[in-house]
Each structure stands twice: as C-alpha cells, then as structure tokens.
Image: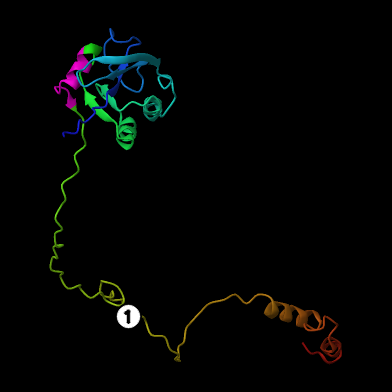
Amino acid sequence: MHKILEVMPMKIAIPTNGGGRNDTVAPVFARAPAFYIAEVDENGNVISEKVIQNGAAMAGGGAGPMAVQTLINEGVDTIIAPQVGPNALSAIQAAGIKLYQVAPGTPVEEAIKAVTGGTAREFTVSAPAPVPPTAPATAPVAPATPTPAYGPYPAPAYPPYPAYGFGWGRGWGRGRGFGRGWGRGRGWGARLGYCPWTGQPSRRTWLARFFGWW
C-alpha cells in the first residue's frame, strides 16, 4: 500500500504597482504600493487571490520588517520580488519564507509560472567557508638598544668658570686741586683780627696794637 503525500498549496506574495493578477511586478519590495497574494496548487493554478495595500509604503523607517510582518500575518510562505533590502531580507530569512527573484516589470502571471515551473532563481544565502586556523607568524625581534639614564645625547662641555680670591697691593699717584675755602678764610680772618674758627675778635689783634705785633 503506497502512502499518498499531500502537496500543500503555495501562498505567494508579489509586490505590485497597486493591481492584481493583471499588473506587473513593482521595482521595489518594502515601498511597493500593494501586494498581490495568491494561493497556488502544485500545477500552478491560482486557487484564491487578493490584493492588500502596503501600509509600510509611507513609513518613515523600518519599512522592510513592517512589510514582511504584514505578509507573515497573511500566512505567506513564498515571496517573489526583484530585490529586497537588508532589513527585509533578515526578516524574511528569520521567518523561513522562500524568496524568488524576477526582473521588475514582469507580468504577475509570468512570475507565478516561473516559480511553479522551477525557472525562477531562488535567493539563498550561502554560509561562508570556514577558514583554517593559521599559526601566527613570529618575526625575530631585534634586541632593544639601551637608553642612557640621562638622555640620548652626551652632556655638553661647559667653559670653565673664573676663580675669585682676595689680595693686597701698594701704589701711588699725583693730583692737582684748588685751595679755596679754609686757607683763604683763615688768612683773612687772621689779618682782620678775627678768629677763623669761632668768628670772634682775636686776642692777637689787641696785643698787636699795644706791642706792635703783626
């Protein structure tokens, strides 16, 4: 007895310019005006279809994840689009939704036939090849040059300082001067009969008058 495997229909979402099956694929995904959602059997026949407006088309930011979440709520398991952004792609891969790529402007019916007929290219992300570990190359290290304790340059040679001390000596000299003041005052004072030291009349004047001194 052979067990018959039941093939589940695909639920495909296609970004359009606002129409349905008679429209074309929009050039963008997250900012597309509308999404055409069709349930297709294994023979490529459309079982059910509808068009929903894309609420993320006018969003300020995060339009990709918002559009993907809208399609997740509709039960979509396959997306056909010309291109998707990195944020939308991450949301699509996290939800396990298959992504097929067709050229923008492709008629919606042709896009569905390309997927069901196996001619559309499925977008897959290949895991990076593991890189074998390599031993770090160790280059020979040259010995460090010792640094002098007081700088890399020799100390400059300063000139010797002059020596200072104490001493003594002898000498003589000649000079000229003017003898005005005491000498002249004394002479006149004596001649007029006044003491040059006190300015008082000298006794010698009185004696000279009586005894003839001069």
Number of numbered tags placed on the structure image: 1
Report the front residue among 153 and 105: 105
Which coloring applies here? rainbow
Report the front residue among 4 and 116: 4
Q: Where residue 197 appears, x then y in whole percent?
A: 78, 84
Picture quadrant where residue 61 is located? top left
- In the rendered image, the quadrant that contains the N terminus is top left
Q: Where residue 149 appears, x then y in whole percent?
A: 30, 78
Picture quadrant where residue 180 is located? bottom right
- In the rendered image, the quadrant that contains the C terminus is bottom right
Report the front residue among 32 and 71: 71
Q: Where residue 2 appears, x then y in whole percent?
A: 16, 33
Residue 106 visible here: no
Residue 197 visible here: yes
Residue 150 lies, with reference to residue 53, above or below; the image says: below
Residue tagged by mark 1? 160
Question: What residue range appears in magenta?
Answer: 110-121
112 horizontally vs 32: left or right = left
Residue at coordinates 85% horizontally, 87% vertically from top-left? 209
Report the front residue among 180 and 13: 13
Residue 196 lies, with reference to residue 77, above or below; the image says: below
Residue 181 lies, with reference to residue 79, above or below; the image says: below
Residue at coordinates 82% horizontally, 83% vertically from top-left? 198
Residue at coordinates 77% horizontally, 80% vertically from top-left? 189
Residue at coordinates 29% horizontally, 73% vertically from top-left? 151
Most extreme residue toward the front is: 1
169 horizontally vs 122: left or right = right
Residue 140 lies in the magenta-colored region: no
Picture quadrant where residue 59 is located? top left
Q: Where residue 52 appears, x then y in whole percent?
A: 39, 16
